[in-house]
Amino acid sequence: MSTTDAEPDGTTAAAGGCHGAEPQGVPQGDPHAVTRHDLGIHGYAQQKDAHIKRLRRIEGQIRGLQRMLEEDVYCIDILTQVSASTKGLQSFGLQLLEEHLRHCVADAAVKGPDAIDEKVKEATKAIERMLRT
């Protein structure tokens, strides 16, 4: 998770992470900013509310698992719910990865081959972690 600091012009800047799409014009607050990515705007920013809603639904599924155990529900029924919860998290992770590729890797393309290599390597490691689960 990254931290944010308010800029004098009202924008926020985050330390590291995945950020948003190209702006029509970069705010004047940071003379070194080329893209919104440089200002700390995350690639998932436009979908944030939908992502939170989705994670709350998954959270409800996890609470449902706890209730099922407390109520001594048949183990196969619990395993079915585990599978549904796992699929929900995997789907969320894939969407976040797609947003990273669209925004952060695209931003790196503007900055050159070294930046592209760094973001592709970062995404590859994230994919490896997701495949291990």
Image: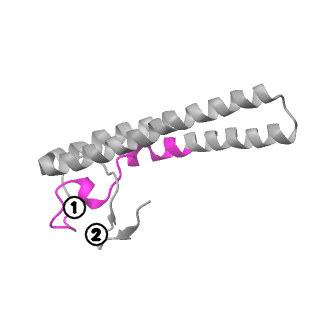
Rendered residue at 18%/53% (across/down): 25
Rendered residue at 46%/47% (across/down): 48
Residue type at mark 2: give it. Answer: Asp
| Badge 2: residue crowd in 10 Å (few <14, some 14–19, many ≥20) | few
User: Percent from the top left, x then y, of residue 126?
Assistant: 39, 44
Residue 39 within the magenta-colored segment of the rendering: yes
Q: Nearer the viewer, residue 129 or 17?
A: 129
Q: Nearer the viewer, residue 5 or 76?
A: 76
Distance between the alpha carbons at the discs numbered 2 and 1: 8 Å
Q: Nearer the viewer, residue 6 or 10?
A: 6
Rendered residue at 62%/40% (across/down): 58
Residue closest to the far front: 132
**For residue 11, which quarter of the picture?**
bottom left
Q: Give the color scheme: rainbow, by chain, secondary structure or one colour.
A: one colour
Say whether residue 53 is left or right of residue 62.
left
Say whether residue 1 is left or right of residue 18.
right
Rendered residue at 35%/52% (across/down): 42
Q: Quadrant of the N terminus?
A: bottom left
| Badge 1: residue crowd in 10 Å (few <14, some 14–19, many ≥20) | some
Residue 104 visible here: no
Give the residue pinned by disc 1: 27
Helix, strand or loop under label 1: loop
Helix, strand or loop under label 2: loop
Give the residue pinned by disc 2: 9
Residue closest to the far right: 71
Residue type at mark 1: give it. Answer: Pro
Q: Which residues are magenta?
A: 27-52
